[in-house]
Image: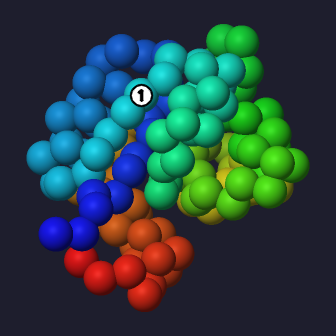
Amino acid sequence: MPEKYRLLVVDDDPMIVELLLMRLEALGYEVRSAANGELAHELAKAFQPHVILCDVVMPKMDGPTLCRRMRAEQNDVPFIFLTAKGQPRDKVEVLSAGGDDYLVKPFDPKELAARVTAIIRRRYPSRSE
């Protein structure tokens, strides 16, 4: 049986984290979470996620800083940013930081699942299910 895809959810809102954990685990993903960028950075080293779902505004280290730090370390894990900030300049900021996709809160969990699936399909095309 192939290994499950690993997702890391990074958000300081416990309700959003719980919703995402339940939804993504029900879809068959192995999911871990962190409440801020510092914790996520350490967890990502050990957990080695296939995709990171990351809030933009968080305590200790924000999402764009986390993404830039990981990119500087040659870690190219795909980032999907989740945020209430939906202005074009906000989107440009996270995409310029190395983000791969962007969803504005509140979002439809089915759309998020479809975006995760699309990124995995493109990023890991040779891996068999």
Residue 120 to residue 73: above or below:
below
Describe residue 70's horizontal placement relative to residue 29 as left or right. Answer: right
**What scheme was used to colour the molecule?**
rainbow
The vertical placement of 118 against 74, above or below, is below
Instruction: Report which quarter residue 114 is drawn in.
Output: bottom left
Please state, as top left, top right, bottom left or bottom right, where the C terminus lies in the image: bottom left
Residue drawn where x is 18% and y is 35% of the image = 22
Residue 21 seen in this snapshot: yes
User: How many residues crowd around disc 1 within 10 Å: few (fewer than 14), some, or many (20 or more)?
Assistant: many
The spot of residue 124 in percent (x, y) is 47, 77
Query: For the view shown, which residue lies furthest in the left direction?
Result: 26
For the point 28% across and 45% down, the residue is: 30
Left-right relation of 65 to 8: right
- Looking at the image, can residue 54 be seen? no
Q: Say what secondary structure mark 1 lies in.
A: strand
- As rendered, which of 27 and 90 lies closer to the eye? 27
Q: Which residue is drawn at 38% across and 33% down?
A: 32
Q: In this view, does 83 lie to the left or right of 105?
A: right
Side (left or right) of 12 relative to 36: left
Foreground residue among 25 and 95: 25
Residue furthest right as drawn:
72
Pointer 1 residue: 33
Q: Nearer the viewer, residue 120 or 73?
A: 73
